[in-house]
Amino acid sequence: MSIEEVVRILKENGVKLAFFGGGEPTIDRELKPLIKQLKKEGISVWLITNGELLDKELVELVKGVTFSIKAFDDELHKRITGVSNYKVLENFKRFAKSGKIVAETVYVKGIVECDEILKIAKFIASLNPKIRFRIDPLVQNPIYEEVDECIRKVRRILPNTYRIRGTGKGEPPNLLYPEVSKIWEKHS
């Protein structure tokens, strides 16, 4: 799909803020040109990334960044992702005071539990104790009580720690996936 097609779809649907995530958006060579075009059209972008390839230009272009730190321990990070977390942590240090970063991690029973999340929180707090930190339960096996207990502990280090809580009362967001899928099928 071309940049023009993406921009057209977003404009036609009245999008004012687009979230780019799922997989790793920063590996797409067209990401910066797309964000620049969207910005010209009055559409802001929020980037959801592991931060490994984050650079100054991207941070300046976007409204905000959800920066996912899978693990603080390098060996654990390698087990989860297959690669070192060195670049991730270095980039987090680099942009922690930009005012655009929201940190996040996922609580995974038996893998990334509260002891590891506390290490992540101490790292974040050492750089910018005002950063918001979201701890998500693993979607496939949410353990809300354990996550909430962990959040209480983490808040002693990083007060702006939370998790998303659904009420079940809201309308689902207007997703453009069906529209994008139709165009993708034409080009496949």
Image: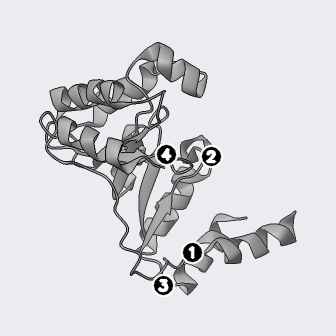
The CA span between labels 3 and 2 is: 24 Å
Label 3 belongs to which residue?
A: 14
Q: Which of 21 and 155 is in front in this view?
A: 155
- What residue is rendered at 58% in x and 73% in y? 7
Of the two numbered discs 4 and 2 in the rendering, the one whose residue sits closer to the viewer = 4
| For residue 74, above or below residue 120 | above
First in residue order: circle 4 vs circle 2: 2
Give neighbour class at mark 3: few <14, some 14-19, many 20+ (Cα, 10 Å).
Answer: few
- What residue is rendered at 57% in x and 43% in y? 24
Looking at the figure, which quarter contains the C terminus? bottom right
Q: Residue 28 carries which label?
A: 2
Whole-percent x and y of residue 23? 60, 46
First in residue order: circle 4 vs circle 3: 3
First in residue order: circle 1 vs circle 2: 2
The amino acid type, in three-letter code, at marker 4 is Leu
Q: Do the residues labelled 4 and 3 touch (CB within 8 Å)?
A: no
Label 1 belongs to which residue?
A: 175
What kind of element bears circle 2?
loop
Looking at the figure, which quarter contains the N terminus? bottom right
Observer able to see residue 103: no
First in residue order: circle 1 vs circle 3: 3
What kind of element bears circle 4?
loop
The CA span between labels 1 and 2 is: 21 Å
Of the two numbered discs 1 and 2 in the rendering, the one whose residue sits closer to the viewer = 1
Label 4 belongs to which residue?
A: 138
- Residue at the far top in the pictured view: 75
Give neighbour class at mark 4: few <14, some 14-19, many 20+ (Cα, 10 Å).
Answer: some
Q: Which of 120 and 64 is in front in this view?
A: 120
The amino acid type, in three-letter code, at marker 3 is Gly
The CA span between labels 1 and 3 is: 12 Å
Give neighbour class at mark 1: few <14, some 14-19, many 20+ (Cα, 10 Å).
Answer: few
